[in-house]
Image (cartoon, rainbow, N blue to C red):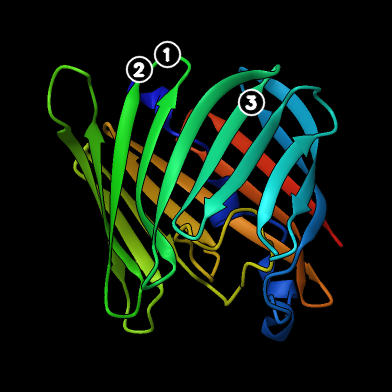
Amino acid sequence: MLSTLKVSAFSLVAVLILNTSCKKDKDAGSSGRQRLKSYTEEITAVGTGHTVETFNVSYDGQNRITSIVSATKPGHRFEYTYINNNKFTYEQVEDNKLMLHRDYFINAEIGKVDSTFQYNIQKDTIAFKYFYDKDNKIIRQKEYLITHYLPPVWYNTIDYVYDIKGTLTKKTETSPAEYTYVYDAEYKNTTITQPDYIPSQELLPTHMYSVRFGITTTTEYTYIYDKGRLSVEKAVEYDGSRQKVTVRTYTYQ
């Protein structure tokens, strides 16, 4: 049941497989992060077939993302509401039903999320606590189960490992799981698809190797840039028996 609490992080690590060697590094994200108008996500996988969905993206006057609304599936959206300088909320809605709610609490000193409280449609409740180094890079995330009858119960810790340049190279969980990131070239994320308060990585990997519950999965990423902005990203994920391909195409404001 805990697996229902995990929200896709595709936008955090974005992906693609279109011959990275044909792109020059100077074109790989030279414009910084910019506001999107929309993006289309196309997924092809064994067992689930082929799906295509387009989302329209909105921001407020402070350049903060406020909503991602499906133009393909009515009632499917992601919404951010900024309460004050110390708190904002996130809601995932499908078929106009609230599937997931999160309260984010901000560490005002560094402008990053300090902790999160969430519940889903099954009423599972979980809390997250974030830890940062002196450069404000996330180094640890602790996860707790919450009930009305007992104090919070720790059940998972995620540790982040960086190289000497500050690039994320590994992520480990006590669940257990391990993720290793490889960068064959420098590709920057130029899209704004979540609030800046949420920890994210500036560089996008070309490969990720994950081991979870004894299953090893390889994901290959490639990226296409147009005028220094990420325009297409593709991920090919396979575990030896199954393959999933995800492609995102972006348009900017």
Q: Is residue 229 above or below residue 84?
A: below
Q: Are marks 2 and 1 in contact (CB under 8 Å)?
A: yes
Q: To which residue does mark 2 refer?
A: 1
Q: To which residue does mark 3 refer?
A: 93
Quadrant assignment for the C terminus: bottom right
Label 3, secondary structure: give it: strand
Q: Is residue 115 above or below residue 27?
A: above
- Percent coordinates x, y for residue 53 in the rendering: 79, 33
In which image quadrant can residue 50 be found?
A: top right
Mark 2 to mark 3 CA distance (whole Å): 19 Å
Three-letter code for the amino acid on which mark 1 is drawn: Gln
Apparent side of residue 238 relative to residue 122 in the rendered image (left or right): right
Mark 3 to mark 1 CA distance (whole Å): 14 Å
Q: Is residue 94 above or below residue 154?
A: above
Q: Earlier in the sequence, mark 2 or mark 1?
A: 2
Three-letter code for the amino acid on which mark 3 is drawn: Val
Q: Residue at x 13, y 29 (%)?
A: 151
- Percent coordinates x, y for residue 52 in the rendering: 79, 31
Quadrant assignment for the N terminus: top left
Q: Are marks 3 and 1 in contact (CB under 8 Å)?
A: no
Label 1, secondary structure: give it: loop
**Crowding near pointer 1: few (<14 within 10 Å), some, many (20+)?**
few
Q: Which mark is residue 79?
A: none
In which image quadrant can residue 107 be found?
A: bottom left
Q: To which residue does mark 1 refer?
A: 122
Mark 2 to mark 1 CA distance (whole Å): 9 Å
Q: Residue at x 70, y 21 (%)?
A: 49
Three-letter code for the amino acid on which mark 2 is drawn: Met
Residue nearest the viewer, comparing 226 with 54: 54
